[in-house]
């Protein structure tokens, strides 16, 4: 295993269980030499996530990324534990179930607000609250999806949220670039997780990928994590403001 993250310390928000993309990123970052703190949404998740590993392999910090005071408290904890952070990962999204099933035209004001706040604004809030404790060459990433660029039936308001998220990554890259801090988005193909199962007809999307993607199979958490490690490492030091697809090549297809 390489040591591309040796000596680096960071936080990964968005671990719910062992299928979470964020969990794969935590494991990979650690394997590549990093010290990792896992960010979870609430106490209940902290309890179940702590069962994923033995001893003190990872630290855990709790923050609902929709609550500024909780992000600030998490930043204080991270600062006392690590000093400056070399990376931060945002792997967080949520939309009302009905907005991932009904026609997009029926998106409610509340549903729009919920999806955009949790899935896009939370990234800006995380970056802003962590900024004072980020090292000058830190790397930040978020997880997005092709539904930001193309119409994928039932993805609906999450597609709009992911478009906002990708634009936010570019604007954050511009602002934080003056400090040498990089901001990028990773765009995984569909993977069977709790968040994905909320999308109506999700399993048929996996079948379509297996049939049409150049690699003839869906991407896996570990592949997304490997690309994430590259983006968090100095190997990608010239890359910022980008959306990097880890989707078995599906996004290049016209038909
Ligand atoms: N699974 C896929 O097919 C897929 C594809 C492309 C992108 N993504 C994106 O990857 C990211 C991770 O999703 P996943 O598939 O690993 O599912 P997941 O359900 O394991 O992770 C989603 C995480 O978001 C967290 N979260 C939701 N609201 C939060 C809040 N207010 N504060 C803090 N945390 C909150 C949940 O606790 C959970 O840990 C999401 O942004 C998702 O949109 C997933």
Image (spheres, grey):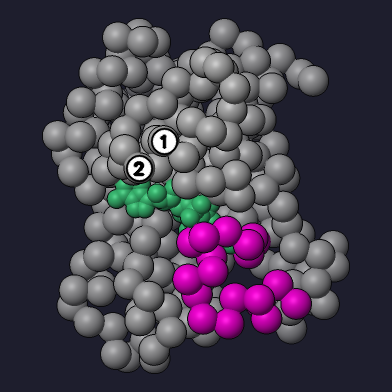
| In the displayed structure image, the side of residue 212 where residue 165 appears, left or right | left
138, 206: nearer the viewer: 206
Q: Is residue 197 a member of the stretch shown in magenta?
A: yes
Q: Which residue is mark 1?
A: 47
Taking 61 as reference, is 35 above or below it?
above
Image spot of residue 181 (x, y percent): 41, 26
Report, in whole angstroms, how far the alpha carbon at label 2 lies from the one at label 1: 5 Å
Q: Residue at x 74, y 83 (%)?
A: 255
Q: Is residue 233 a member of the stretch shown in magenta?
A: no
51, 236: nearer the viewer: 51
Q: Residue at x 68, y 53 (%)?
A: 246
Q: Determine if the C-beta at disc 1 is less than 8 A from ligand 1.
A: no
Is residue 186 in view?
Answer: no
Asked if disc 2 and disc 1 are in contact, CB closer than 8 Å, the reply is yes
Taking 30 as reference, is 100 above or below it?
below
Taking 243 as reference, is 155 above or below it?
below
Q: Which residue is mark 2?
A: 44
Q: Which residues are magenta?
A: 189-207
Image spot of residue 153 (x, y percent): 52, 84
What quarter of the picture does the N terminus occupy? top right
108, 252: nearer the viewer: 108
């Amino acid at each position: 295993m390489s040591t591309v993250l040796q000596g680096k310390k960071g936080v990964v928000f968005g671990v719910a269980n062992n299928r979470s993309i964020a969990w794969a990123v935590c494991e990979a970052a650690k394997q590549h030499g990093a010290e990792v703190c896992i960010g979870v949404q609430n106490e209940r998740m902290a309890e179940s996530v702590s069962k994923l590993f033995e001893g003190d392999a990872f630290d855990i910090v709790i923050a609902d990324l929709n609550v500024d005071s909780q992000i600030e408290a998490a930043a204080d904890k991270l600062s006392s534990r690590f000093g400056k952070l070399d990376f931060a990962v945002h792997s967080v999204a949520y939309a009302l179930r009905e907005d991932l099933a009904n026609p997009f035209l029926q998106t409610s004001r509340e549903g729009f607000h919920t999806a955009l706040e949790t899935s896009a604004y939370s990234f800006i809030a995380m970056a802003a609250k962590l900024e004072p404790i980020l090292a000058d060459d830190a790397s930040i990433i978020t997880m997005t999806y092709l539904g930001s660029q193309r119409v994928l039936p039932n993805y609906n308001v999450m597609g709009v949220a992911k478009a906002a998220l990708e634009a936010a990554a570019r604007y954050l890259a511009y602002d934080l670039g003056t400090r040498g801090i990089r901001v990028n988005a990773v765009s995984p193909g569909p993977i069977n997780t709790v968040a994905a199962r909320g999308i109506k007809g999700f399993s048929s999307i996996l079948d379509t990928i297996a049939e049409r993607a150049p690699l003839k199979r869906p991407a896996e958490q570990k592949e997304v994590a490997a690309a994430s490690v590259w983006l968090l490492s100095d190997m990608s030091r010239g890359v910022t403001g980008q959306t990097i697809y880890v989707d078995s090549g599906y996004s290049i297809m016209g038909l």
